[in-house]
């Protein structure tokens, strides 16, 4: 096969493979805005889970404290009855001292219970607001998701077209050249075939020997950059195949 023609096939494949890489990227990567929206959403879910855990912990603490308060109430009733039945001063003093103790215990626990109620109320409010997506948030998300769906659909169509063009090129160039390209591609992907830029390699920017520049220009044989080993071509004379749209 004529070297210039082979180069044209190689340049075509390089171009198509780069287009395929871009299409795949668009297919897998949501636009920046949607990605940051999704990150914010994930952060909110994390916060919500933390608040729910805290809520469960406070509820358990509250239930335990309520039990203590209930039994202190019973104790207080018990001592109040005793107080009404004392027969001497010593017994009265003893009961009053017990009662004072119970009252003090009750007071600290009831204060703590009240604080827990307030804490619970605030937590429940937080959980409710974190669980609910506002209308603006939902609209913004839906718009971003719709835009991504369009991007994905277009990328899928592009991918299908690119794959078809790759197959077509493979068929046109024949097996031997295809295998030759594959070898080159596997050693230098994602950039295996690069245009010469004046008298330099456009990939590694090394200046090329004048003789190499001549070989690339004449397309007498395949010529590789001395420093990066990529296949060089002259963009003035070698262009990728043009496909039907
Ligand atoms: Zn180079």
Image: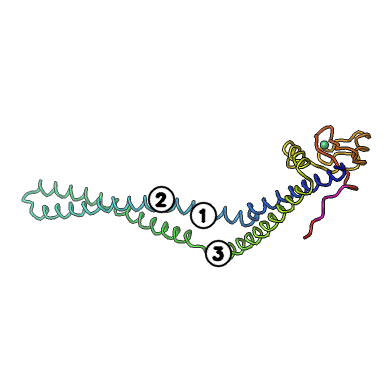
Determine which residue is flagged by label 2: 53
Residue at coordinates 58% horizontally, 62% vertically from top-left? 141
Determine which residue is flagged by label 3: 138
Q: What element carries label 1?
A: helix
Name the main secondary structure of what is drawn in magenta: loop
**Circle nearer the N terminus (2, 3):** 2
**Is ligand 1 less than 8 Å from the beta carbon at label 3?**
no
Quick check: is 18 in the magenta stretch?
no
How is the protein colored in the picture? rainbow
Report the Cα–Cα distance between label 2 and label 3.
26 Å
Magenta residue span: 238-242
Quick check: is 240 in the magenta stretch?
yes
Q: What element carries label 2?
A: helix
**Is ligand 1 less than 8 Å from the beta carbon at label 2?**
no
The quarter in which the C terminus is drawn is: bottom right
**Is ligand 1 less than 8 Å from the beta carbon at label 1?**
no
The quarter in which the N terminus is drawn is: top right
Image spot of residue 32 (x, y percent): 65, 54
Quarter holding ligand 1: top right
Determine which residue is flagged by label 1: 44
Q: What element carries label 3?
A: helix
Report the Cα–Cα distance between label 1 and label 2.
14 Å
- Residue 142, above or below 63: below
Disc 2 crowd rating (10 Å Cα; few below 14, some 14-19, many 20+) is few
Side of 200 relative to 169 (left or right): right
**Circle nearer the N terminus (1, 3):** 1
Report the Cα–Cα distance between label 1 and label 3.
14 Å
């Amino acid at each position: 096969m004529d070297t210039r023609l082979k180069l044209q096939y190689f340049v075509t494949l390089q171009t198509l493979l780069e287009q395929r890489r871009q299409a795949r990227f668009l297919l897998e990567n949501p636009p920046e805005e949607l990605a940051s929206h999704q990150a914010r959403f994930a952060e909110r879910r994390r916060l919500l889970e933390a608040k729910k855990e805290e809520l469960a912990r406070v509820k358990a603490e509250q239930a335990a404290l309520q039990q203590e308060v209930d039994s202190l109430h019973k104790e207080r009733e018990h001592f109040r009855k005793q107080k009404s039945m004392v027969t001497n001063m010593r017994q009265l003093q003893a009961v009053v001292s017990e009662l004072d103790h119970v009252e003090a215990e009750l007071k600290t626990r009831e204060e703590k219970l009240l604080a827990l109620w307030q804490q619970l109320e605030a937590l429940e409010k937080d959980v409710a607001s974190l669980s609910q997506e506002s209308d603006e948030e939902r609209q913004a998300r839906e718009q971003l998701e719709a835009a991504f769906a369009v991007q994905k659909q277009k990328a899928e169509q592009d991918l299908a077209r690119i794959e078809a063009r790759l197959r077509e090129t493979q068929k046109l160039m024949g097996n031997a050249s295809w295998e030759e390209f594959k070898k080159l591609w596997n050693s230098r992907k994602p950039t295996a075939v690069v245009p010469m830029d004046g008298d330099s390699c456009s990939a590694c920017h090394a200046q090329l020997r004048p003789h190499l520049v001549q070989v690339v220009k004449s397309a007498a044989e395949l010529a590789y950059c001395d420093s990066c080993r990529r296949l060089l071509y002259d963009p003035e004379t070698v262009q990728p195949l043009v496909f039907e749209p």
